[in-house]
Image: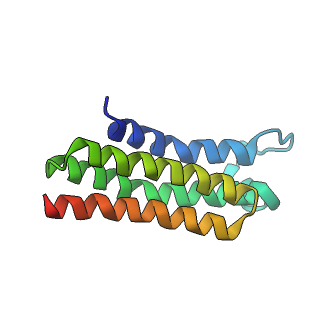
Amino acid sequence: MSVAIASVLVAGLMPIVCAGIAKAGQRNYDNHNPREWLAKQTGYRARANAAQSNSFEAFPFFAIGILVAIQAQVPQARIDTYAAVFIAARVAYIAWYVIDKDKLRSVAWFVGFLCTLGLFSAALGA
């Protein structure tokens, strides 16, 4: 499995990790109405839930970028580099979101976004 394909798997699991952070250790978690319960959270739990939403939003654009780059026969090393940097940026994004480092979070989001654009750009140039 290439780094790029593994990165799609990791990126697809990131929302689940964020949800786990939001829910972990909470005794009054309502599994009958999880979205309503999450909407009422504050602090790091609310931020982890927001990171979950953003991870779902970022995933399709990234995954399609990987597939388009592969289809366009962009060199695998280049695709893997964009993918690895994207994953590192998204891990940083989630961590900085949860611990409330807004400016660093924005930088990480932008780096991940640039990686996704880079995949499409590389495909256009291939």
Q: How is the image coloured?
A: rainbow
Q: Residue at x 22, y 52 (%)?
A: 69
State the quadrant of the N terminus. top left
Q: Residue at x 51, y 41 (%)?
A: 13
Find residue 105 and report its image quarter: bottom right
Towards the viewer: 72 or 30? 72
Instruction: Tell which residue pokes out farthest to the top in this image.
Output: 1
Horizontally, is 86 left or right of 47 in the view? left
Find residue 32 and report its image quarter: top right
Horizontally, is 126 left or right of 82 in the view? left
- In the picture shown, does residue 27 fall above or below 102? above
Horizontally, is 104 left or right of 76 in the view? right
Relative image position of residue 54 (x, y in whole percent)? 54, 60
Instruction: Tell which residue pokes out farthest to the right in this image.
Output: 27
Q: Residue at x 68, y 57 (%)?
A: 96
- In the picture shown, does residue 66 fall above or below 112? above
Relative image position of residue 71 (x, y in whole percent)? 15, 48
Towards the viewer: 94 or 50? 94
Relative image position of residue 97 (x, y in whole percent)? 68, 59
Is residue 41 visible in the rendered structure shown here?
Answer: no
Relative image position of residue 88 (x, y in whole percent)? 52, 48
Marker count (numbered): 0
State the quadrant of the C terminus. bottom left
Is residue 67 visible in the rendered structure shown here?
Answer: yes
Q: Residue at x 29, y 54 (%)?
A: 64
